[in-house]
Amino acid sequence: MNETLQLFSLRGKRALITGSGRGIGLALARGLAGAGASVVINDRNEGKASDIAARLRDEGIDADFAVFDVTDREQVIPAIQRVETHIGAIDILVNNAGIQRRAPLEGFDERDWNDLLRVNLDGVFHVSQAVARHMLARGRGKIINIGSVQSELARPGIAPYAATKGAVRMLTKGMCAEWARHGIQANAIAPGYFETELNRALVDDPAFSEWLCQRTPAGRWGRVEELCGAAVFLASPAADFVNGQTLFVDGGLTSVV
Ligand code: NAD
């Protein structure tokens, strides 16, 4: 492998991807593995995490799994310790687990608000803190937080989601502010609209699809595999001096009105 390609290699690295039982997280696990990483699949559902890890092993990927709910600190801290002790050091953390709830702001259910905050923001805090303590001791590590175009732009019906994703963008900068000196690079990927279960209601709505394809310069929905290049880059030595950034992978959506 030539020197430039070597910069993007994840050989010998281990990546933990939260919420990787399906959707974007699963695609990122495959993408990071394709660049040479071992992967640890996480979901809050044990069957899902172990099945996915087994499926990836059948595909020739070095895959393990760790079951925990990112919102539950009492699960997160021992689970991260177990991975570090029994599977191996976490070199790359992808904070991907996330949920969506849609309703007009004036009638937004308080429980939905709390759920969004707990998964999309508290979850990033709990898992990053638990993993970063190990990374800080080693003096190296890569953290990739999954934001959204809603880290930058609001839309009717999803104001609370946008608030969590805006916060993820700022938390990424905060991680950079505190941990860059200790060899950790923390960056975010902000996906545009990708066809996953999280977006099922939108995918199934032809009026929304038509609006989206007009609104997005690329003229289409994203394919989850199209997020892998950004993740491999941010996880690799090629990004050793890239820190606190949010990389929008959105077909140009946030560049135009
Ligand atoms: P998805 O619903 O298909 O998958 C999310 C996964 O996270 C599921 O496997 C779910 O079980 C897991 N999860 C949810 N809560 C969890 C918890 N508390 N603990 C552990 N795991 C949990 O969603 P997706 O579309 O793949 O989205 C993944 C991430 O990408 C989310 O952070 C989402 O906000 C973000 N995102 C998605 C899109 C998109 O177009 N799909 C766009 C921008 C950002």
Image (cartoon, rainbow, N blue to C red):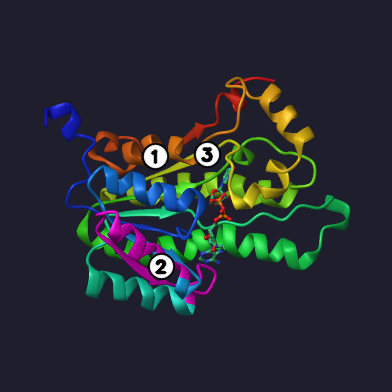
N-term-proximal mark, 1 vs 3: 3
Measured from the top left, where is residue 126 in percent x and y? 47, 66
Q: Secondary structure at mark 1?
A: helix
Is residue 176 left or right of 165 when viewed as pictured? left
For the question of whether residue 111 can be seen, the reply is: yes
Asked if 60 appears above or below 202 in the picture, the reply is below
Q: Amino acid at mark 2?
A: Asp
Q: Ligand 1 near label 3 (Cβ, under 8 Å)? A: yes
Q: Amino acid at mark 3?
A: Ala
Tag 1 residue: 228
Residue 75 falls in image quadrant: bottom left
Q: CA distance from mark 1 to mark 3?
A: 12 Å
For the question of whether residue 185 can be seen, the reply is: no
Q: Secondary structure at mark 2?
A: helix
* Span highlighted in magenta in the image: 48-73
N-term-proximal mark, 2 vs 1: 2
Nearer the observer, 5 or 167: 5
Residue 5 circle label? none
Measured from the top left, where is residue 235 in percent x and y? 31, 44
Q: Callout 2: 10 Å neighbours few (<14), some, many (20+)?
A: some
Residue 98 falls in image quadrant: bottom right
Ligand 1 quadrant?
bottom right
Q: Callout 3: 10 Å neighbours few (<14), some, many (20+)?
A: many
Asked if 148 appears above or below 125 in the picture, the reply is above
Is residue 157 left or right of 63 when viewed as pictured? right
Tag 2 residue: 51
* Residue at horizontal 18 percent and vertical 27 percent from the top: 4
Quadrant of image for the N terminus: top left
